[in-house]
Image: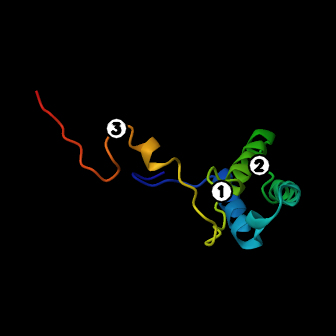
Amino acid sequence: MGKGKYETTVFDRARDELFSHIQRCGVLEADDEHRNEWLKDTTDYLRERYPELDREQLDELTEIGNRYCRPAIRHVEVDEEAAIEPIGTEEEIDSSGSEAGEEKEVSVA
């Protein structure tokens, strides 16, 4: 391995191929049952394609695939016509005792 160079491993290639398959197959939009079935089939395919991978590496690929397919923040469509409910009334929000919109005097000691 040369200075500053990173030599890709079999695991790296399998992981990159898994990500590529996820992107091309549209599995991100699938329901959980179909996504799990797809991931199992794809992991089986990767096991055959990369026989050098051991059970621990295949399990790690499955975990990586699961995390990639289920992001922490779900992107959902927003209903533009849905009303936004306020958290509270102006009186509840402005608990300083002053009228809403009235500037509050601050004294500095």
Residue toward you, 76 or 44: 76
**Which residue is at 68% across, 67% downward?**
20
**Which residue is at 69% across, 49% downward?**
67
Question: Distance from label 2 to label 3 (Cα)?
Answer: 57 Å
In the displayed structure, would residue 55 be above or below residue 46? Answer: above
Please, what is the three-letter code of the amino acid marked with disc 1? Arg
Please, what is the three-letter code of the amino acid marked with disc 3? Gly
Q: Which residue is mark 2?
A: 62
Measured as percent of width and height from the top left, residue 43 is found at: 82, 54
Q: Which mark is residue 97?
A: 3
Mark positioned earlier in the residue sequence (2 or 1): 2
**Which residue is at 19% across, 41% downward?**
105
Question: Distance from label 2 to label 1 (Cα)?
Answer: 20 Å
Question: Distance from label 1 to label 3 (Cα)?
Answer: 40 Å
Q: Which residue is mark 1?
A: 74
In the displayed structure, would residue 100 be above or below residue 27? Answer: above
Kindly indicate whether the residue at mark 3 contacts the one at mark 1 (C-beta within 8 angstroms).
no
Please, what is the three-letter code of the amino acid marked with disc 2? Thr
